[in-house]
Amino acid sequence: MSTIEQTCARLRELRLTTMAQAYELQTEQPKLQEHSFDERLALLVEAEVSGRENRKLSRLVQVAALPDKAAFEEIDNRPSRGLDKSLLSTLSTCGWIRRQQNLIVVGPTGVGKTWLACAFGHQACRLKIPVTFYRTSDLYGDIGEAVHDGSLPKLKLALSKPSLLILDDFGIGEMSASAAQVLLDVVDRRMRTGSLLITSQYPTEKWHSFFPDPTIADAVLDRVVHQAHRIQLKGESMRKLQGRKRLEEA
């Protein structure tokens, strides 16, 4: 075994896999031999750091379970959608998550609320911020199952742990008394540990009626709505526009 092979094997033993791959590539590029030792070492270290960051991002995105591959760079800023570019630019830094603030995105069906929520989720992952995505109706089902099989404490912890919890389509699906209580417990804990991003077809004035108990509704909404940034999406359904475009291209 050559010295290069031995070095690469040692690097892999140390779990410096990307550095080992970069070193092998260096040996195959004669021009790099003209660089100094320090310059070549710097390239190897940078490759390892970049590789680790990419792997961490992949893990965060996988755990977040975001349904759409959305990115801020692809946001449709047409005036008809009612998006405030200045507000989006400010929110894209995710400082609101670090300050344990919330974000509410409302608008009619099809205008891109879920996609925009996923864009925020991906942006948070890029900044190494843990995210979890839940369709609200699915969450209600999981809460019901957790109540019956005794795994409710585990579910509450999973909902409280990520820095950003996305609840999509709030107002869709029937909220049980147990689900309302879990929401209150999670929201109360998250006031000190993280942020919520909630999307809904309904204006916040109607959210109170979604809860079976008005007292719990008051407690949850007081904690969520009053410290939330808001985005009101407008315009024609993006699904209709995309469907029309596909028909025109066919």
Image: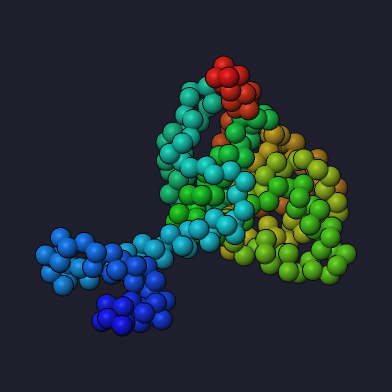
Residue placed most toward the observer, 227 or 210: 210
Residue that appears at 48% across and 49% down = 123
Residue 19 percent coordinates (x, y): 33, 70
Q: The C terminus lies in which quarter of the figure? A: top right
Is the residue 239 above or below the residue 35 in the image?
A: above
On the rendered structure, is 200 left or right of 66?
A: right
Residue sitting farthest toward the top: 248
Residue that appears at 57% across and 57% down = 62
On the rendered structure, is 168 left or right of 10?
A: right
* Quarter holding residue 81: top right
Q: Would residue 241 be visible to someone looking at this image? A: no
Residue that appears at 46% across and 36% down = 74
On the rendered structure, is 82 left or right of 73?
A: right
Display colour scheme: rainbow
Residue 232 percent coordinates (x, y): 58, 32
Residue placed most toward the observer, 27 or 47: 27
Is the residue 137 above or below the residue 28 in the image?
A: above
Q: The N terminus lies in which quarter of the figure? A: bottom left
Q: Would residue 143 be visible to someone looking at this image? A: yes
Residue 167 percent coordinates (x, y): 67, 48
Residue that appears at 75% across and 36% down = 206
Residue 202 percent coordinates (x, y): 71, 34
On the rendered structure, is 13 left or right of 66?
A: left
